Image (cartoon, grey):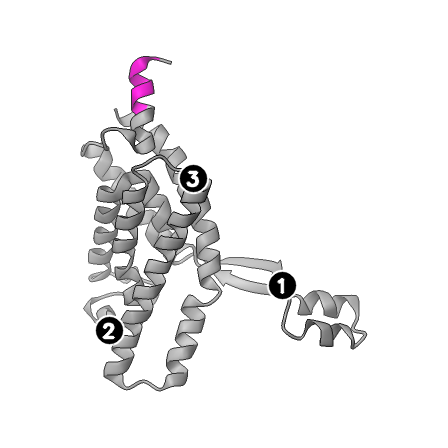
Amino acid sequence: MSKRISRQLNSFRYKGEPIRFRLGTLLITCLCILLLVIATFTQVTIKHLYIPLDAIEFLNKNASAIDILYHFTRTYRYIPQTPMIFFIVALLGRKYGILAICGYIILGMFFPIFALGGGISYLFEYGFGYILAFIPAIFFTGTLLKVKTDFLRIVLMSILGVCTIHILGILYMLFLATLRHAPMYLITSWISSQSGIQILYDIFFCVIAIYLGRAARKILWIVMC
């Protein structure tokens, strides 16, 4: 391997110069916006075992094996939008990652590319705060990715970024709910559906997304430089 390629790979590990803005960079940024739109409308069905609160009581009922399997299995429909955000920041870095998210938000003000539609009126949707929170999440994660990272630090980055998105999203929702005098059951049900078990899934898949983004970034650097 030549010294030039070696230096480029080191830079792609966030030790050197960032990606230069070129036509290829713009195209990759637009592609990332498209990937984010696709992720917004993608649902992945996840099934896994879990232990309910009534586990002991249920087992004492002499239930059949099928009933036990059904009772101890959870089905969750997951939208991989947040992991795509972390893939983008790992691929493009902080500056162009924020550019991609801003482009996504601006397009959403004119086209129905958000989960529940689009347009200026989407500013008053409860879920819009989560979208706005993508920007500070990318800023924090992209800043931390500039230093040498290991598995533990990537996990901590994912926790920080995901918590940033959910905390700011909840605060935005609470702000709108206060203005609308929404009932408490609506607020709690929204938080539970958007920021309950979803947080754990987000952290798990965001760790994977960062590794995938960093691997793609190395390849992208060799092609573009």
Pick the front one: 174 or 42:
174
Q: Amino acid at mark 1?
A: Tyr
Q: Which residue is mark 2?
A: 124
Callout 2: few (<14), some (14-19), or many (20+) C-alpha neighbours within 10 Å?
few
Measure the C-alpha gap from mark 3 to mark 1: 27 Å
User: How many numbered marks have been drawn onto this rendered protein structure?
Assistant: 3
Q: Which residue is mark 1?
A: 50
Give the structural element (helix, strand or loop) at label 1.
loop
Q: Position of residue 63 (x, y in %)?
A: 78, 73
Q: Can you say whether 160 is above or below 13 in the image?
A: below
Q: Residue furthest top?
A: 2
Residue drawn at x 23%, y 57% as measured from the top left: 105
Query: Where residue 211 is drawn, which disc sits there?
Result: 3
Q: Amino acid at mark 2?
A: Phe
Pick the front one: 162 or 38:
162
Residues drawn in magenta: 2-8
Q: Position of residue 103 (x, y in %)?
A: 21, 51
Which mark sits nearer the N-terminus, 3 or 1? 1
